[in-house]
Amino acid sequence: MLAQRLVAALARPAAQQPLWPDPARTAAVVRQLREAAPIVTPAETARLSARLAAVARGEAFLLQGGDCAETFADNTEPHLRANLGLLKRIALVLTHAAGRPVVPVARLAGQYAKPRSQPVDAQGLPVYRGDIINSVEPTLAARTPDPHRMLRAHANAARAMAWARRICREELADPHALHQQNLRFVGSSPVGARHLRQAEELDRSLRFMAGLGTRGRTAQQSEIYVSHEALLLDYESALLWADTRGPEPLFSSGLAHFLWIGERTRGLDGAHIAFAELLSNPIGVKIGPNTTPEQAVEYVRRLDPHATPGRLTLISRMGHAQVREVLPPIVEKVTASGHQVIWQCDPMHGNSQTSGNGYKTRRFSHIIEEITGFFEVHRELGTHPGGLHLEATGEDVTECLGGARGLGEDDLPARYRTACDPRLNAEQSMELAFTVADLLAE
Ligand code: PEP
Ligand code: MN
């Protein structure tokens, strides 16, 4: 029955799928993937579901972040350490400001497939769709979809997950060490003085804890969950466990704890939403400014049929100019449905622009403005602003404009390294963290 529902879901129209050149070879790869080892376990995913239920009830905060697109070349221990370290440092600041647990979910160990707005690039070549499908290199051969890349993606995801577990357990579980790094940010940032009070209060809290005999190195402090966009259905449908623990039999993805459906593939008649309906994992749906309140309620009805708090995360990415106008009627209608969803703000994807010198970028002030609007909307409606979804790296890239250093268009070429969308760098991310801390503490 469940297997038949999967076949029916995948038979629906699926947007943004590659045209594999050799279907027989693709089928052989998918058969091999079915035999591959899972990246995550159902018990871990169940733990995340419990944590997200608390977020939906307003008792915790969800922090999700990482690269827009992971690449095989950047799947290195230093890169993972930088990104995970940043996530944990932001989480520490937000935990303190909110006085609530922060649930860390990385865009990691599978964020290899990208939806694109055009099928070809400026040179007329098939567009880069992420390392799981083709190569960024601008030749016809490299851009031709290669199913074997799904096996490479799986192997890379397995390695990333093993590293992430180790790094979070052995290197990032000590809040004092994370705090020392944050103090270095406060000491060196041009706007550090603005955040000094927060940092000093955190310092006092840590010393108070130490006085009570705990350094805060708890199991919770070393946890990490992973997520990616469930875009490439050949990959997503290859590693599923049967999960009979809930009110109806479903599949638990072996590929990530949390999966989301993107803005370009959220069609209610399409394969992606139908596929997500069959998963017991917590699910996100990106909602852009043309989402209607009726559509939002339909996602809730389809993806949260048993009214499970935190089962569904609605990830609004409205843009700084529209969030205050577009989000309220959606929140009101969903709230009236009685379902407890997580409201998460993605302040990145509604604020993309092209710089005068041709770089896809985002302005720090627009990102902050959308987050501020998101908090205002929820405060006004009495709902919980439950989370943030960021594209951010712990490395010193030059991809987003602005921030305390006033990064300008002429600075972008220096270290513009993203394979897809522009990420906040470490300093911009910490500035964002302290700014959001002020919003949380209000
Ligand atoms: C993304 O998260 O990288 C993405 C493509 O987002 P969206 O679906 O919101 O455009
Ligand atoms: Mn992106």
Image (spheres, rainbow, N blue to C red):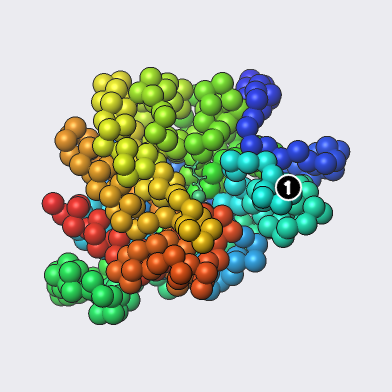
Position in image of residue 17 (x %, y %): 67, 37
Kindly identify the residue that appears in the image at 64 percent across and 37 percent down: 16
Give the quadrant of residue 223: bottom left
Position in image of residue 80 (x %, y %): 51, 67
Kindly identify the residue that appears in the image at 30 percent across and 60 percent down: 432
Q: How many marks?
A: 1
Residue 289 in view: yes
Task: Tell me if 63 is positioned left or right of 17 in this view.
Answer: left
Kindly identify the residue that appears in the image at 42 percent across and 35 percent down: 288
Q: Is mark 1 within 8 Å of ligand 1?
A: no
> Residue 298 versus residue 210: which sits nearer the camera?
298
Name the residue carrying label 1: 124
Residue 202 in view: no
Point out the image quarter for the N terminus: top right
Badge 1: how crowded within 10 Å, few (<14), some, or many (20+)? few
Q: Is residue 439 above or below residue 239?
A: below
Badge 1 element: loop
Task: Tell me if 23 is positioned left or right of 192 in this view.
Answer: right
Kindly identify the residue that appears in the image at 42 percent across and 22 percent down: 295
> Residue 95 versus residue 294: which sits nearer the camera?
294
Position in image of residue 402 (x %, y %): 35, 63
Task: Tell me if 252 is positioned left or right of 408 in this view.
Answer: right
In the orientation shown, which residue stands out farthest toward the front?
Answer: 356
Position in image of residue 183 (x %, y %): 26, 76
Question: What amino acid does circle 1 point to?
Answer: Gly
Q: Is residue 93 above or below residue 326?
A: below
> Residue 235 versus residue 66: which sits nearer the camera?
66
